Image (cartoon, rainbow, N blue to C red):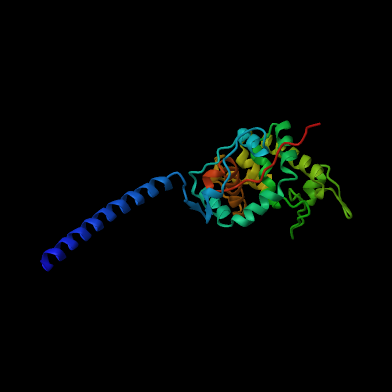
Amino acid sequence: MTCSLFSGILRAMQQVISVSKYILFIVLSCLFLLAGDFVYTTVTGVSILDTVIDDTSDSTVWGSMRREFMLDHQVDSARVRIEIRKWLADPDRLNHILKAAIPYIDFIHQETQEKGLPAELALIPVIESEFNPNDHSNKGAVGLWQLMPQTARELGVKTRSGHDERRNVTASTLAALTYFQDLGQMFHGNWLLAIAAYNCGQAKVAHALTRAGTDDFWMLHLPLETRLYVPRLLAIAEIVKNPAKYGVQLPAVSHAERK
């Protein structure tokens, strides 16, 4: 009698355990399905949950810029992918730079529009000065666009001591974009060459073209800084174009009232 009772209790416990396992399986399955609606994949430690929906509306400066990007960002290029990873490797610095752009990016973008230039050129100060109008280099470059003294003077920008217009955002932006217009014409609309020339000078680019016998930027023998400069710009433009893809939150920037 005791053995029979014990066997009955054991069978009942086994049934409870079996049912519990089934219930646990159902619960876990439901949780897994629910989790599918919330992607926790991270890019350099930034959760996709923390990002903002990619707004391509013209009501924001970033949205307007994305619509007017003209360049192939060449994301299949290993050099561009490396630069994208570099930007994403330091999200705090990237966020700091993008926030520093807030007071200036709308004005610069408006000027690229008016001059018929690629919207990507509005991001040149990201590379040059991290959008710091008081930035200066040990080579003598100053301002948002890091204009060298001779280049500034040729473009009509005053560089007198105590009154250096390279620190003036309006004056330096108009000068830099005028220079880009000239470079675009010089290199027949090949904007990668124009961007390279902005960095290292048109003479070096022209010499590299003669040596290589091709106008393919990627095939030219240029200074290392320039070979990194162009893909770095393409990389930041690609991130601005597809922020959600890269787990980046762009700061809110609305269009200023145009006079």
Query: Camera-side residue: 3 or 44?
Result: 3
Q: Which residue lies at the image location 74% right of the left edge and 52% below the top edge?
A: 132
In the rendered image, the quadrant that contains the N terminus is bottom left
Q: Which residue lies at the image location 78% right of the left edge and 34% below the top edge?
A: 257
Give the side of residue 154 with respect to residue 36, left or right.
right
Query: Camera-side residue: 174 or 181?
Result: 174
Give the side of residue 253 with respect to residue 14, left or right.
right
Task: Say whether residue 222 is visible.
Answer: no
Query: Camera-side residue: 145 or 34?
Result: 34
In the rendered image, the quadrant that contains the C terminus is top right
Give the side of residue 156 with respect to residue 90, left or right.
right
Q: Position of residue 172 (x, y in %)?
A: 79, 44
Q: Position of residue 226 (x, y in %)?
A: 62, 51
Q: Position of residue 130 (x, y in %)?
A: 69, 52
Q: Quadrant of residue 16?
A: bottom left
Count of residue discs: 0
Q: Position of residue 175 (x, y in %)?
A: 78, 41
The residue most toward the bottom is 2
Task: Say whether residue 65 is visible.
Answer: yes
Q: Which residue lies at the image location 54% right of the left edge and 45% below the top edge?
A: 218
- The answer to whether residue 256 is above or below residue 3 is above
Q: Quadrant of residue 136?
A: bottom right
Query: Camera-side residue: 249 or 8?
Result: 8
